[in-house]
Amino acid sequence: MPDLLIELFSEEIPARMQARAAEDLRKKVTDGLVEAGLTYAHAGAFSTPRRLTLAVEGLLAKSPDTREERKGPRVDAPEKAIEGFLRGAGVTREDLEEREEKKGKVFYAVIAKKGRPAAEIIAEVLGDTIRNFPWPKSMRWGAGSLKWVRPLHSILCILTDETGAEVVPFEIDGITASNTTEGHRFMSKGRFTVTSFDDYAARLKRAHVILDPAERAEHIWHEATNQAFASGLEVVEDKGLLAEVAGLVEWPVVLMGEIANDFLGLPPEVLQTSMKEHQKFFSVKNPKTGRIERFITVANRETADNGATVLAGNQKVLFARLSDAKFFWENDLRVARSGMTAWTEQLANVTFQNQLGSQADRIARIRALAGEMAAGVGADPALAMQAAEVAKADLSSEMVYEFPELQGLMGRYYAQAAGFPDAVAEACEQHYSPLGPSDDVPEGAVARSVALADKLDTLTGFWAIDEKPTGSKDPYALRRAALGVIRIILAGDLRLSLDQFIDSQLLKHKINLSRDGAKDAEIKALEDVLDEIADHGVFGAAFRTVIEKFDGHDDAPETGEGSLLGDLETRVPDLSADLLAFFHDRLKVYLRDQGLRHDVIDACVAMAGSDDLTLLVKRARALSDVLATDDGANLLQGFKRANNILTQAEENDGVSYEYGADVKFAETDAERDLFAALDTAGAAISSAIEAEDFASAMQGMASLRAPIDAFFEAVQVNSDNQIVRRNRLNLLSRIRTICLSAADLTRIEG
């Protein structure tokens, strides 16, 4: 079985595209070979800046012969039907066979195909792969029609077996496949012939090319850490930068340089970001002080002076870059020390979103909401509002304008320079968090208040203007914001009535969106509703209270259908319920990754207080734990049996069996035992739920398993005695009521 080696040699491929391109080459070629009947044992793809390589082991020498029987129309079918069958099968009339079947004679076509040599199939597949390669961007050059990411210079394509290597006959756009390649652009001379993958990889290494990107990355990291260690320093780990640099060089030469003393006072994050973004340098820090003192650069060649000239050039460019960073830093510090007000005022001229106003408008909303949420988060409201006011001030700074990825972090430095409390500076840095599922949540109470307010204002704002995520589209990262709220609440074990804050914030957005066309009395009434929500947290009641207050007044706002108040009274609760459902959907995804079933969460979402996410999750975990036991699983079946019998009886009888179960009508010990068990468990479950001890509540529910099982084994519910039947149905109603007080078990599957 021969081995296949393909190399597509070109000008430099962007580092960010190499890994994906190597995988695309492997998939497209191997899929094409298998589809044509050529199976293989193993395939591996590699990339360097100038080449994509595919090695396929254990390939069939030719595709197998095939024989296919295809049933056609009846012999007496219309001529056009027969001609269509002939075209589809690719045969002539003489090739058809007539076979007798139950419904008469039928044509059959026997299609025999001879296997083809591997080289012929490879040429077809490779041609299709190159012409239809899925580059994110490609270019056409010269007079040809071929498009590639960069000009394609040569193609190596050989099949190797025990008899030797042969070139696969192949040509595309004037480029003919061969068995030759070339090594490093500067450190090797001329092209050379290869006979197999092992020979290819070895000869490339002698020509100063390391084929495997993982090997290049390992070499870079090993050399960098060794050089830093020899000087008592540490390289700042950055896996993304390491992968990118490994894609920039074919023969990595690691060099360590010094940072001028002028810049050692810059924040380490500024040095690290500037060197990474502009120069692709690794930062080297002093573990004792945490300062960035040196840098690692990776050259693509060895030099006679051991890299001294390369290093000198890099240091010269770095000096210019860091001079800019130092200038930004010093200018920003002057503004920060004056109180940061100049920056916050500038944000009035920065649009957050066309309908939702400027960044300054947004900050004002976040400031108020952070103050409202502070008590529930355990923060000082005054500090939370102060932090919200300056948390986004660094967006106007020169440093963040140059390096947007430093937003928040620079805010902490500037808040410290301005003399703000540590909690405020911490909130400036952490209020954007968490940015992803693995990102840390804010630690301090003030930072949590601002982070929650920031995310809730964003979510309610886009809900208010009907810009919700649809399908895979989420341009404003609203799913991420909702998950951030969930993680902050659960990590801090916070007890927040989310619905109340959603209601009030949605109404604030609607008031702002309606100001231009609304009357003063309408705006005043809506602001009164906001006050009522803040005091009592019930949206509908707040509206009714305010509307009643205006009854009989000459300047009373309109409240009927079509009025602003009437519209918002019906519209805002719908938006609020929809946004809360969005939170619940995100919570399901989050908890599913932790092993909680979606139907268990649904059973708890259906209970009162589901906007308290901490309470909801505690209930769900307790229910999940109980259902994992035999008692819990069997109780669920007993509950469903009781609920089904009861539901059917209520539908048939047209009455509701919700009360009146009396032990004096019990005829069996099983009935009397169930009465006693329900009395005991009902009281225990009620007390446990009131104390929010859901584990005990669920265990109390599971304790009913045995008496319910015994009841159904010994008792026929639909007795001929109607008094006994009604009593037993009312007893089933007690089972349903008690079980549903812990969770909505009707939503549990199975």
Image: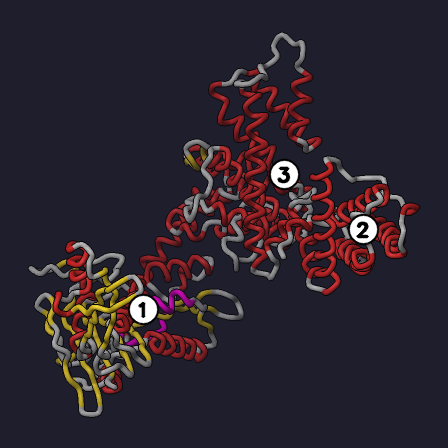
Question: How many residues crowd around disc 3 within 10 Å: few (fewer than 14), some, or many (20 or more)?
Answer: many
Q: Does the image show residue 720? A: yes
Mark drawn on residue 23: 1
Taking 481 as reference, is 541 above or below it? Answer: above
Sequence-first disc among 1 and 2: 1
Q: Which amino acid does label 3 sit on?
A: Asp
Mark drawn on residue 197: none
- In magenta segment, residue 252: yes
Spatial separation of the CA atoms under disc 1 and disc 2: 57 Å
List the single residue furthest toward the right: 664
For numbered disc 2, what is the local secondary structure? helix
Residue placed most toward the observer, 408 or 675 = 675
Where residue 260 sits: x, y (%)? 38, 64
Position of residue 357 in the picture relative to residue 426 (left or right): left
Q: Which amino acid does label 2 sit on?
A: Ile
Where residue 672 sits: x, y (%)? 89, 53
Q: Which of marks 2 and 3 is in front?
A: 2
Question: How many residues crowd around disc 1 within 10 Å: few (fewer than 14), some, or many (20 or more)?
Answer: some
Taking 600 as reference, is 288 above or below it? Answer: below
For numbered disc 1, what is the local secondary structure? helix
The span shown in magenta is: 239-258
Q: Which residue is drawn at 70% across and 57% down?
A: 637
Q: Residue at x 66, y 14 (%)?
A: 550
- Which residue does the numbered mark 2 point to in the structure image? 685
